[in-house]
Image (tube, helix red, strand yellow):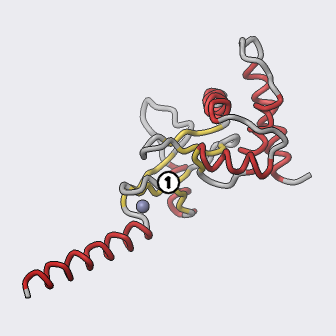
Amino acid sequence: MSENTELYNLAAQRLNEFMKGKITRKTPERFEILRVVCQTQGIFSIDELQEEMEKKAKFQVSRVTLFNTLKLLEEAKLVIKHTLSRAAHYECCVTPHPMVCLVCEQCGLVRKLESSKIENWLSEQKCKHFAVTQPVLYFHGLCRSCMVKNSIKKRKANSKTKIQKK
Ligand SMILES: [Zn+2]
């Protein structure tokens, strides 16, 4: 059994328990979305999940279904929602672990920084009168492609002013 199947089985069991006594129906689409979420590495947007669903899933699901299911998975604590940039980003967190995220303030890209040093530090942090369930640290800044775009723009602007001066 692969690690992803184990993760999915655990997640599906938790989702079943969460939905007990709730009015929401246990549709096969929801579990299919959960399966794809469990296979997805790192942070993803709804658009990226929709792409993955088209590639991997047995069902075609609408954006509305994806959005509502992610909301349900978030309530069931199976997914974490990062609401920092223009579009919300999600991440599978069936087994919570400390994470460090890089957020580009220009294009809205959110990606994970793999740093066991910071992750270890995060997991060791204790807060007075506060029980930490999910330690997340965000670094805001500029991504590589935005830095490149900006320097090209700057160079173009500089050469224009030089031409105007001549
Ligand atoms: Zn960027």
Q: Where is residue 146 in the image (x, y as percent from the top left)?
A: 39, 66
Regarding ligand 1, which quadrant of the image does it lie in?
Answer: bottom left
Does 156 sit above or below residue 109?
below
Say which residue label 1 marks.
Answer: 110
154 in relation to 107, above or below: below
Characterize the local packing of mark 1: few (<14), some (14-19) or many (20 or more) Cα atoms within 10 angstroms: many
Q: Nearer the viewer, residue 141 or 138?
A: 141
Q: In which quarter of the image is residue 20?
A: top right
Q: Residue, x 76% and y 31% (percent of image)? A: 30
- Residue 137, position as x, y percentages in the image: 46, 50
Res. 95 image quadrant: top right
Spot the residue most to the left: 165
Q: Residue at x 54, y 64 (%)?
A: 115
Ligand 1 within 8 Å, label 1 CB: no
Q: Residue at x 31, y 75 (%)?
A: 151
From the top left corner, tell me how far across and down residue 33 is, in percent: 74, 38
Residue 37 or residue 160, whichever sits in front: 160
| 139 displayed left or right of 69 | left
Q: Which residue is drawn at 25% across and 74% down?
A: 154
| Viewer-side residue, 56 vs 137 | 56
Q: In which quarter of the image is the C terminus?
A: bottom left
Q: In this view, does 70 lie to the left or right of 115?
A: right
Report the amino acid beneath label 1. Val
Task: Between residue 59 and residue 102, name the one nearer to us.
Answer: 59
Residue at the outermost bottom position: 166
